Image (cartoon, rainbow, N blue to C red):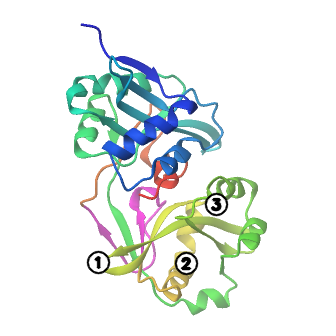
């Protein structure tokens, strides 16, 4: 018996593939929003949008999405393939690993999955993916008037953000500013600014700022007090950030929470601290 046909997901296949995901994986994501997530132009000549399988009648019965992006890591541009939206109908589950192998067999990429289920996490570990530290550092947002007296501030106006950022941070901003579920600010002093991207969330039944990413870890950490003060004045009690992304422990009241799902990655040269949530489904979808 012949195996079901495995083929790359081309741009013209996205409406049908994303309708399949909407119907069988997550109805809360409209198919067109899902398709837009794959269409981002993030510095990679993408080979596909992942892979899918069809039955004998040509119907899509499974697939694995891939979102491609490139960003600098320690002064070098690295290319990433973010695995997302792995869905196979029950009758074809034996074909699941064919899909994963097709994606990771592509040379020249570091691979990530930033929202795996428990089953997907175990499957990818079999393919030599490594888990990342799942802990979150939670900071209590407090007033910080002394920081403002020193000239440290937060910029929220888009024009002022663009004018204050260096070229690399500005590119990150321009690559992500069109997603309506993301919020942006620049924190720092003078020309020393870090772009900060976050979402409004809830933690322990209280409003919280959930950090998606930032352009400069050292500046972000240094100016956390004024950032926390800004979030407090915006009605958010806490700030939550993945511990692995921080270059050190904050000198600010905080605690570490555990029990989150492990994100996973596969790379011969990068560490978990090098893996961003930007340029992935974590930014391109409201999850």
The extreme top residue here reads: 1
- Residue pointed to by mark 2: 227
Residue 228: x and y in percent read 50, 80
Q: Is residue 201 visible?
A: yes
Q: Looking at the rendered structure, which numbered label has been put on residue 254?
A: none
Residue at the image point whose x is 64% and y is 88% from the top? 148
Q: Secondary structure at mark 2?
A: helix
Q: Position of residue 251 (x, y in %)?
A: 45, 76
Q: Say what secondary structure mark 1 lies in.
A: loop
The residue to which callout 1 is attached is 204
Q: Is residue 49 above or below residue 26?
A: above
Q: Are marks 3 and 1 in contact (CB under 8 Å)?
A: no
Specify whether 207 is left or right of 189.
left
Give the residue displayed 45% in from the left and 20% down from the top.
7
Quarter of the image with the C terminus in it? bottom left
Q: Secondary structure at mark 3?
A: loop
Look at mark 3 in the image and give the residue it sits on.
Answer: 177
Q: CA distance from mark 3 to mark 1?
A: 28 Å
Q: Which image quadrant is residue 157 in?
A: bottom right
Q: Dividing the image into 4 quarters, which one contains the N terminus? A: top left
Q: Which residues are magenta?
A: 239-258
């Amino acid at each position: 018996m012949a195996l079901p046909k495995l083929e790359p997901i081309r741009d013209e296949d996205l409406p049908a593939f994303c309708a399949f995901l909407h119907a069988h994986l997550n109805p809360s994501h409209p198919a067109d929003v899902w398709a837009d997530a794959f269409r981002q132009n993030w510095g990679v000549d993408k080979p596909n949008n992942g892979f899918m399988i069809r039955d004998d009648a040509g119907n899509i019965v499974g697939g694995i999405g891939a979102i491609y992006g490139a960003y600098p890591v320690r002064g070098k541009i690295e290319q990433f393939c973010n695995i997302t939206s792995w869905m196979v109908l029950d009758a074809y589950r034996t074909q699941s690993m064919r899909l994963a192998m097709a994606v990771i067999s592509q040379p020249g990429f570091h691979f990530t999955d930033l929202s795996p289920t428990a089953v997907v996490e175990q499957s990818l570990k079999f393919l030599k993916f490594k888990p990342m530290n799942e802990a979150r550092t939670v900071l209590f947002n407090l007033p910080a008037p002394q920081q403002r007296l020193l000239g440290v501030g937060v910029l929220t106006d888009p024009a002022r953000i663009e004018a204050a950022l260096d070229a690399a941070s500005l590119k990150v901003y321009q690559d992500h500013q069109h997603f309506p579920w993301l919020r942006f600010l620049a924190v720092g002093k003078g020309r020393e600014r870090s772009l900060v991207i976050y979402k409004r969330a809830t933690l322990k039944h209280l409003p919280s700022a959930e950090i998606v990413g930032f352009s400069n870890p050292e500046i972000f950490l240094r100016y956390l007090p004024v950032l926390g003060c800004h979030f407090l004045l915006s009605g958010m009690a806490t700030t939550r950030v993945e511990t692995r992304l921080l270059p050190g422990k904050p000198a600010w009241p905080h605690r570490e929470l555990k029990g989150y799902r492990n994100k996973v990655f596969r790379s011969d040269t990068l560490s978990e601290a090098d893996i961003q949530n930007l340029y992935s489904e974590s930014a391109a979808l409201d999850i």
